[in-house]
Amino acid sequence: MNNTFSNELKALCKDVNKALCSIDLLKTNCNSPDEKVIEAENYALSAGGKRIRPILCLAFYKLFGGDNDISEIACCLELMHTFSLIHDDMPEMDNDDFRRGKPSAHKAFGEDIALLAGDGLAILPFEVISKAALSGKISYETSAKLINLLSSSAGNKGMIAGQMLDLYSEDKAVDEAYLVKMSRLKTGKLLEASCLFGAVLADADDEMLKSARIYAENIGLAFQMVDDVLDVIGDEAVLGKPVGSDKHRSKTTFADIYGVEGALSKARELTDCAINAIEKYSESEFLIDLAKYLTERNA
Amino acid sequence: MNNTFSNELKALCKDVNKALCSIDLLKTNCNSPDEKVIEAENYALSAGGKRIRPILCLAFYKLFGGDNDISEIACCLELMHTFSLIHDDMPEMDNDDFRRGKPSAHKAFGEDIALLAGDGLAILPFEVISKAALSGKISYETSAKLINLLSSSAGNKGMIAGQMLDLYSEDKAVDEAYLVKMSRLKTGKLLEASCLFGAVLADADDEMLKSARIYAENIGLAFQMVDDVLDVIGDEAVLGKPVGSDKHRSKTTFADIYGVEGALSKARELTDCAINAIEKYSESEFLIDLAKYLTERNA
C-alpha cells in the first residue's frame, strides 16, 4: 500500500466517521426510553469497519468531477450496510455474538432493540436523502434516482435476495454459478449502488455510469472471494470474529470451489477488470489502488 | 353503518387489494429460493386487514380534488404497516403466533425468512414511490415529500420510537401522558402519514394539510383506545387473535387508565374533533363516516 493511497484512504475514512457522527437524525437529546434504539444504531455504526461503501461513493463523485460536500449522503450506504449486519448477526440468521471484536448489537442491547435498530437504519437513509432534496442540497430528480438505486439494491431483488440465497445454501452443496449469483446480490448490489451513488451525484453520463458499474461488479465479486479466503486463513485478532464460521455452518464458499490460491487468483483477475474499466479517467489512481487494496487486505 | 358508506368502504378495500396484487416488485417468476421472501411478504399482505391506511390516503386524495389512479402509492402505507406487524409478531417482540386468524409470518415461514420479509417490506415502499417518479407518474418533488413523510413517520422518531416505548412499558406502570405519546408514535404517525399522503398527492394547500393532520391525530388516538378496549372485551373469533394479550404481558392500556366505558367515551370525543376538522370540505361524508366506523368497530 503506497503512502499517498494510504493517507487518502485514512482521510476519507475520517471524513465518513465525522459525517456519521454529525447526522442530525441520529442525535439523541432527551433521555427518553425510545432513544435507546438510536443508541443501539450508533453503537453498531461506531464499531468501525472500513467504510468502503461511502468511500466508493465519495471517490466516484470526485472522479466524475463532483466537488460539493456529499458526505452525509455517502453515509446512507453505511447506514444500509450496518442495518444488514445487525440483522445478519441475530440468532435467527448467522447467530454471531461478535462483530468487529465487540459484542453484536443484540448482545449489547437485547434482541428486541437490535431488531428495531436494524429497522431504523434500513429506513433512515431514505429520510436523510429526501431531507437533502427538500432542503435544496440535491435536486429532487437526483434524490429519486438515489432512492431508487438504494432501495432496489438493498431490497427483495438485491441484498435481501442474496441473504435468502445465503440462508438456503446452509448444509447444501451449491455450485459456482449459485455462489456468484449470491455474492452479486448479497454484497455486490450495495457496492454497486455505492459507486453509482457517487456517479449520479456528480451527474455522470451513461458512459461513466457504465464504467462505475463494471468496476463495482468486479470489485464486489473479488471482495467476496477474499472474504471467503480470510474466513479460512485469516487472523481472528485482525478480523474481530472467529474464523471458520462458514465451515462451521456448512456453507460452500469460493475457497471450497477454487481453493484458497485459486480464489485469490480469481480475485486478482477481477480486480484487473475493475481497474481496466476506470483507468481511462484522469485521477483514477485512488480507485485503482482501492481495488488492489481490497484484494490484498488481511481483514 | 349506512349503506352508502359501507359500499364505498368495500369498494375502496377491493381497489386496495387489487392494487396490492398488481405491484410488479412483489411478483415472483422464477422459483428461485430467494423468492421465498417475497412469498412471505405476499402471505403477510394477503392476511386481510381493514386496509385503513391506504383507504385514508385515497379518501384524502379524493377530498382534495385528486382524480388519478394513485392506488399503488397508497399501498405503500400498507407495505410499511405490514412490515411492522411481521416484526412485532416475532418472538423477540410480542411473540404472537397468530395474526388475523392465520399463523404469523414467522410461524408460517420461519423466523429467518420473516425477519427478511419485514426488512423487504420496509424498503419496498421507497422503491415503489421513486419508481413512480422516475416513470413520470408523480413529480420528483412529490416523491421527495412522500418519501420524507413515510420515512420520518416509520423511523426512529416515529413508529419505531413508539415500539420502543411499548417495549419499555412492559411490567411497568405508565401514566396517561406516556400512553398518549406511545400511541401517537406507534400507530398515530403512520395513520397521519396516510392522510397526508393523499393530501400531498392532491397538491393540497397548507390549510388542507392542517385539516388532514388534525383529523389523523384524533382518529389515531381514538383508534388505539378502541384497540385497547377490544383487547379487553373483544371477540377472539372476530379479532383473529387472543384477547387479553396486553394484560398477559402486563402492559398498561387506555382501558386500565380510563376504564372500558371511559376509553370509549374519550374515543368518541376524539372522533368528534376529527370530524370537526374536515366537515367544512364538500364530499367529506366518507371520511366522517370512516371516523365513526373506526370508533364503533368490533375488530
Image: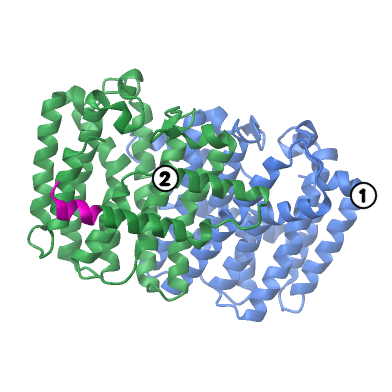
Chain colours: A green, B blue
Q: Is residue B6 left or right of residue A51?
A: right
* Amino acid type of the residue tagged 1 in the rendering: Glu
Q: Is residue A20 left or right of residue A206?
A: right
Q: CA distance from mark 1 to mark 2?
A: 46 Å
**Which contiguous range is marked in magenta?**
A1-9
Dominant SS of magenta comes to: helix
**Residue count near mark 2 (Cα–Cα under 10 Å), binned few <14, some 14–19, many ≥20:** many
Snapshot quadrant of residue B56: bottom right
- State which chain disc 2 sits on: A
Residue A12, x across and y down, in percent:
28, 57
- State which chain disc 1 sits on: B
Q: From the image, tell me which residue sits under label 2.
A: A82
Residue B218, x across and y down, in percent:
76, 63
Is A84 located above or below residue A175 in the figure?
Answer: below
Pick the residue in front: A43 or A264. A43
Kind of element beneath mark 1: helix
Pick the residue in front: B74 or B144. B144
Marks counted in the figure total 2
Is A26 located above or below residue B227 in the figure?
Answer: below
Q: From the image, tell me which residue sits under label 1.
A: B261
